[in-house]
Image (spheres, coloured by chain):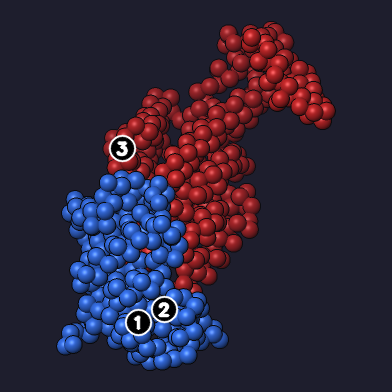
Chain colours: A blue, B red
């Protein structure tokens, strides 16, 4: 694979006070790759991806996104955030804005598009996640699955090169998980670079190029998808897989 | 049929058990002993016609007093021939506020902009005078007009300042954070009357001899700063109620500090604290009569002057009832306006 390396974490360490959340994380992600991150709760999965767009600050090591190295400069942080989209477990839609405004706000005020262009863009992505008919409703009027799809559309409206998903289906009722995973699968097939924290192993088998297993702040196992499921080496991975599959 | 309804209604609402019945009976008793005498005093045996105190021959209220002094109560010693300028200013204010009920959301932001940035200038030019209009120094302002000028100035300036202080108190930059905390705690820790005396009496002593800041302006700024500390704490309550995910989402979309606060954080935070803000503004409105104590004659001051007039001695009750009625109406307006806002935004949220 001679594709461009778009994310590179090397020797990343992070502490919450005394608690060592991320231990010497090394991770490279290439253009168009889909990575699934799994592991028991409290293993640092969310913290890891939140360090990629600086929602959390790492204390040691370097995080490089394409040509930008993350540091304290607001410029580098905002540049990275405009290239990296994120979808959250709790959707985090803005409840005081309509779905359309949720999507059009950042393009018009961060990307400085005209309001009309931003709304057209928003409608395009809302159509892609199949909720363009709900555009004028408010988040509270939508089901969980619809809200999460709207949140995906909102992130896509910034036309990111990389998408991060932080347990996107964990807060959903079972019957709504599929509609969100379908949207994510479409996105994966369109060639988006994705890092997904998820326990949806069927989804992982279908779309992931690599699976990463984390435990107690370290990457315990990192393998191409097929090998990860057929031939896990680490005892903790085996235990985890036996519990979840 | 209707009487039957009334009986069932009072059974369920007034006399559902023995202690509710007791309380209801007591309240009815209070109403019976207080309301008829008041109605008799205020309306039935009151005098409305006349020009002098001696025209009041009945036992009830002498509203002639209020009638004769009405213009002074409203405008203080503002020159009579220029009163239209005050009226015009308030007319502009009333029209722009009522307009905001009817126009689309998109235009409301322009009205808000007008009220905060343009209206104060127009009102000042009109009331103070300039561009060929006769200058009316602020010491001649008075009556209800002055009450409203101070209250509106206080509301318009304390609100943005309070919001900034609330944000400052939660800032990650220590200088801004501790400055905001000190500022808020200082102004909340001293009584308003101290602020008024300081602004009216002490502040000029601290200035160089040849400089002069208008007394009304000093008082108005003092009130605005004082109230901004309260607004800041109310707004901070709203900021704290906002889930952390909203900040995450806004930041993940590349919004900087100001965009995040302006579009995402403040609209939601302020919405949740509308009742608290209305509360503060009503308190502000009712605090303004304190300026009587530093020698400014707003409506209560004018009433005090009028009741001390040798031809009108003994009219205090009429004057104070009148003032109470006016403050009640103004506060009720603020309160119902805030309830209206609250209702409107709570439906959007659902």
Mark 2 residue crowding within 10 angstroms, few (<14) / some (14–19) / many (20+): many
Judge from the rendering whether residue A99 lies leftward or rightward of residue B62; answer left or right.
left
Per the image, the residue denoted by label 1 is A211
In the rendered image, residues at marks 1 and 3 fall on the same chain: no
| Tag 1 subunit | A
Residue at x 34% of width, y 68% of height:
A86
In the picture, residue B67 is in which quadrant? top right
Lower sequence index among marks 2 and 1: 2
Expressed as whole percent of the image width and height from the top left, the position of residue B320 reads 64, 27
Q: Which mark is residue B199?
A: none
Please identify the residue farthest to the front as the structure is shown: A230
Per the image, the residue denoted by label 2 is A38
| Tag 3 subunit | B
Pick the quarter of the image with the C terminus of chain A.
Answer: bottom left
Work out whether residue B115 or residue B346 is closer to the camera in this orientation and state it.
B346
Residue at x 36% of width, y 50% of height:
A97
Per the image, the residue denoted by label 3 is B104
Can I make out residue A51 in this image? no
| Tag 2 subunit | A
In this view, A24 is above or below B105: below
Query: Do residues under tags 1 and 3 come within 8 Å of each other at their CB atoms?
Result: no
């Amino acid at each position: 694979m001679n594709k461009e390396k778009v994310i590179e974490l090397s020797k990343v360490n992070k502490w919450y006070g005394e608690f060592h959340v991320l231990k010497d994380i090394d991770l490279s992600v290439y253009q168009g790759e889909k990575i699934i991150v799994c592991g028991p709760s409290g293993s640092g999965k969310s913290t890891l991806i939140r360090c990629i767009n600086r929602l959390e600050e790492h204390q040691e090591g370097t995080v490089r996104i394409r040509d930008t190295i993350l540091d304290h400069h607001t410029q580098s942080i905002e540049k990275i955030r405009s290239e990296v989209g994120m979808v959250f477990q709790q959707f985090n839609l803005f409840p005081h804005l309509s779905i359309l405004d949720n999507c059009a706000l950042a393009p018009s005020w961060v990307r400085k598009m005209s309001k009309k262009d931003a709304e057209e863009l928003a409608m395009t992505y809302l159509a892609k996640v199949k909720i363009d008919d709900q555009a004028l409703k408010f988040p509270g009027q939508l089901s969980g699955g619809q809200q999460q799809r709207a949140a995906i559309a909102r992130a896509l409206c910034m036309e990111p090169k990389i998408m991060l998903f932080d347990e996107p289906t964990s807060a959903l009722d079972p019957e709504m998980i599929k509609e969100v995973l379908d949207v994510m699968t479409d996105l994966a097939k369109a060639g988006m670079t994705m890092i997904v924290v998820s326990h949806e192993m069927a989804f992982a088998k279908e779309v992931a190029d690599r699976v990463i297993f984390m435990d107690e702040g370290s990457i315990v196992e990192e393998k191409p998808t097929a090998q990860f499921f057929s031939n896990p080496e680490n005892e903790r991975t085996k235990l985890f897989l036996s519990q979840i599959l | 049929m209707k009487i039957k309804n009334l009986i069932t209604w009072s059974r369920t609402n007034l006399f559902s058990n023995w202690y509710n019945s007791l309380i209801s009976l007591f309240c009815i008793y209070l109403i019976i002993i207080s309301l008829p005498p008041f109605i008799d005093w205020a309306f039935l045996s009151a005098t409305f016609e006349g020009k002098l105190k001696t025209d009041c021959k009945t036992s009830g209220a002498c509203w002639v007093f209020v009638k004769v002094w009405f213009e002074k109560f409203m405008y203080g010693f503002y020159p009579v021939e220029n009163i239209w300028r005050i009226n015009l200013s308030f007319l502009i204010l009333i029209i722009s506020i009522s307009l905001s009920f009817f126009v689309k959301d998109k235009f409301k932001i322009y009205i808000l902009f007008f009220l905060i940035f343009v209206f104060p200038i127009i009102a000042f030019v009109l009331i103070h005078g300039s561009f060929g209009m006769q200058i009316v120094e602020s010491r001649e302002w008075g009556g209800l007009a002055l009450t409203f000028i101070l209250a509106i100035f206080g509301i318009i300036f304390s609100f943005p300042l309070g919001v900034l202080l609330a944000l400052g108190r939660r800032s990650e930059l220590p200088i801004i954070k501790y400055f905001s905390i000190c500022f808020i705690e200082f102004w909340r820790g001293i009584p308003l009357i101290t602020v008024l005396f300081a602004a009216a009496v002490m502040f000029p002593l601290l200035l160089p001899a040849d400089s002069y800041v208008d007394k009304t302006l000093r008082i108005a700024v003092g009130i605005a700063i004082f109230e901004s500390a309260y607004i800041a704490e109310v707004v901070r309550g709203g900021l704290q109620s906002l889930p952390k995910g909203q900040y995450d989402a806004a930041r993940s979309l590349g919004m900087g500090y100001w965009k995040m606060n302006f579009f995402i954080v403040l609209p939601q935070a302020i919405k949740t604290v509308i009742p608290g803000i209305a509360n503060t503004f009503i308190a502000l409105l009712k605090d303004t009569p304190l300026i009587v104590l530093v020698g400014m004659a707003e409506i209560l001051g004018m009433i005090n002057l009028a009741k001390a007039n040798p031809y009108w001695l003994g009219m205090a009750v009429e004057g104070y009832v009148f003032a109470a009625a006016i403050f009640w109406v103004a506060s009720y307006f603020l309160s119902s306006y805030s309830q209206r806002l609250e209702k409107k935004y709570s439906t959007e949220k659902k």
